[in-house]
Image (tube, rainbow, N blue to C red):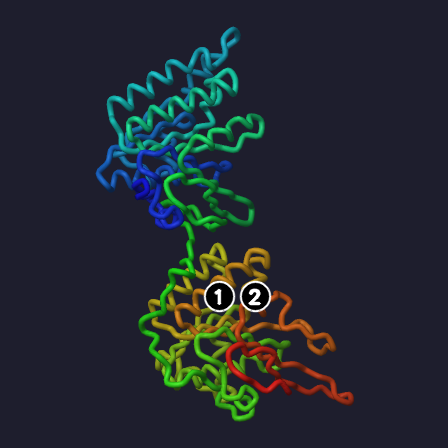
């Protein structure tokens, strides 16, 4: 049996760490200024307060008043605070050391204060903000590492779960070496475009590797974590189907498909603007609604009112389907911070509202909005999760080429995540433009290849 875990105070991070930080362990969170290190540390202490534990915040950088001012929803009176940050008198009285180094003057007094506070309070959890400052209490890298290793041993002997924050320091690469001596370590990365978390060490158990989006709120870090595909189960409200397939209700299309598409599959409908992709899609959705399979339609390109009006104009009773709660349309406003967050919200909506069909219209906008490099992998994972849940998926793809002799299903290499590909094209025949339809792929069932 592995080491007992305790909650970090952040639900998503607990999931990634298989339960939280190792109890009694030394943990490290590193990141640039503004990445959320102190926020996560206060969440960690706040969780300890909720569990009736004694918690201690040791600050080597900021006084208590500053922490209270900037973290009012996370800091509370139950959090004991030890301030060993420089006071204003250090500046006003010009306390600059000429003969001795800061390590020679300040190391012993700070060490005594830490020891006395810990011995007196006997805390269960400690946040130390930040470990980088300890570098200046040593005259060289060797003394720094010896000092930190000794401090870690002291904390472990007391059984205190301790979280250190740290900033990457290019000038003192020896800071990195303390990673070898901690029990758990993670990194918070913040750029102008994204924020992501990476766990790179946990001695107490395995953990979920990779990069995970997060955001910093007044109540703490929120980490977006999608379920692991291996753990996903079929949604209980999705019943066994009477037939294996569903059709479009259009005889010629159904003949081309030799009956239709299988349930719980991913279907890509691709074609240029105006060729009839969404109209054809709605033919399938109308048949699914008649079979009592509720549909979640995510519109990335078009306003809901415009979408409904357009369908009603071609005698597809969208308003009636919405009133019967067989169709639910969501409009994309770009408010989710990341593609992972949007996917998580969509999974939650599907489960909560007992939806059995999902439409992403169009997948181009979804990919381009969040960036191709950051979207294809989560989209692949999303589709795998949905299939295990038993959800039937439609991806609508807009082809930028209106008339072309070159053929490609999509420019995003989505073929490997789809079970079925239905394409619509404009073709030039003797100087006139005509429309063509064909089936490029149908993984589980037969189909006619001619268009």
Question: The C terminus is located in which quarter?
Answer: bottom right
Q: Residue at x 47, y 50 (%)?
A: 212
Q: Which residue is mark 1?
A: 332
- Secondary structure under tag 1 reads loop
Q: Nearer the viewer, residue 291 or 416?
A: 416
Q: Is residue 115 above or below residue 182?
A: above
Q: Which residue is mark 2?
A: 365
- At horizontal 31% and vertical 71% (from top left) the residue drawn is 236
Specify the quadrant that holds the N terminus. top left
Q: Secondary structure at mark 2?
A: helix
Residue 168 or 438: which is nearer the viewer?
438
Q: Give whichever of 373, 176 is nearer the camera.
A: 176
Q: State the residue at coordinates (47%, 29%).
A: 178
Residue 186 screen position, x and y as percent: 45, 40
- Note whether 277 is above or below 156 in the view shown: below
Please report the residue visible at 43 percent of the width from the left and 65 percent of the height from the top.
385
Q: Mark 1 near mark 2, Cβ–Cβ under 8 Å?
A: yes
When asked about the image quadrant of residue 105, the answer is top left
Q: How far apart, in angstroms, are the residues tagged by discs 1 and 2?
A: 10 Å
Q: Is residue 301 visible?
A: no
């Amino acid at each position: 049996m592995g080491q007992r875990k305790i909650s970090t105070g952040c639900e998503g991070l607990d999931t990634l760490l298989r339960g939280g930080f190792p109890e009694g362990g030394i943990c490290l969170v590193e990141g640039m200024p503004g990445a959320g290190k102190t926020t996560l540390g206060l969440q960690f202490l706040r969780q300890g307060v909720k569990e009736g534990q004694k918690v201690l915040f040791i600050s080597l950088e900021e006084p208590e008043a500053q922490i209270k001012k900037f973290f009012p929803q996370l800091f509370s009176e139950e959090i004991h605070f030890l301030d060993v940050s420089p006071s204003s008198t250090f500046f006003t009285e010009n306390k600059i050391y000429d003969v001795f180094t800061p390590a020679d003057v300040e190391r012993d007094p700070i060490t005594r204060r830490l020891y006395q506070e810990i011995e007196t309070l006997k805390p269960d959890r400690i946040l130390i903000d930040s470990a980088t400052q300890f570098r200046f209490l040593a005259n060289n890298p060797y003394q720094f590492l010896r000092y930190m290793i000794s401090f870690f041993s002291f904390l472990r002997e007391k059984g205190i779960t301790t979280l250190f924050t740290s900033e990457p320091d290019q000038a003192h690469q020896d800071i990195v070496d303390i990673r070898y001596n901690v029990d758990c370590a993670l990194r918070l990365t913040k750029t102008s475009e994204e924020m992501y978390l990476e766990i790179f060490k946990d001695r107490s158990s395995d953990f979920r590797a990779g990069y995970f989006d997060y955001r910093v709120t007044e109540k703490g870090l929120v980490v977006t974590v999608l379920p692991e595909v291996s753990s996903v189960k079929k949604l209980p409200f999705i019943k066994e189907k009477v037939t294996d397939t569903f059709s479009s209700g259009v005889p010629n299309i159904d003949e081309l498909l030799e009956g239709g598409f299988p349930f719980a599959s991913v279907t890509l409908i691709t074609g240029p603007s105006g060729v009839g992709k969404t109209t054809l899609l709605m033919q399938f959705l109308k048949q699914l609604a008649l079979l009592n399979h509720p549909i979640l339609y995510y519109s990335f390109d078009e306003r809901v009112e415009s979408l409904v009006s357009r369908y009603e104009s071609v005698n597809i009773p969208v308003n009636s389907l919405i009133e019967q709660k067989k169709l639910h349309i969501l409009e994309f406003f770009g408010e989710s911070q990341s593609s992972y967050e949007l996917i998580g919200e969509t999974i939650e909506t599907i489960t909560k509202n007992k939806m059995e069909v999902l439409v992403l219209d169009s997948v181009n906008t979804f990919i381009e909005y969040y960036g191709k490099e950051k979207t294809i992998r989560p989209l692949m994972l999303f589709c795998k999760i949905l299939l295990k849940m038993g959800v039937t998926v439609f991806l609508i793809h807009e082809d930028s080429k209106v008339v072309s002799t070159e053929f490609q299903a999509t420019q995003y290499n989505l073929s490997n995540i789809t079970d079925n590909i239905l394409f619509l094209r404009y073709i030039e025949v003797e100087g006139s433009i005509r429309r063509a339809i064909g089936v490029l792929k149908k993984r589980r069932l037969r189909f006619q290849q001619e268009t």
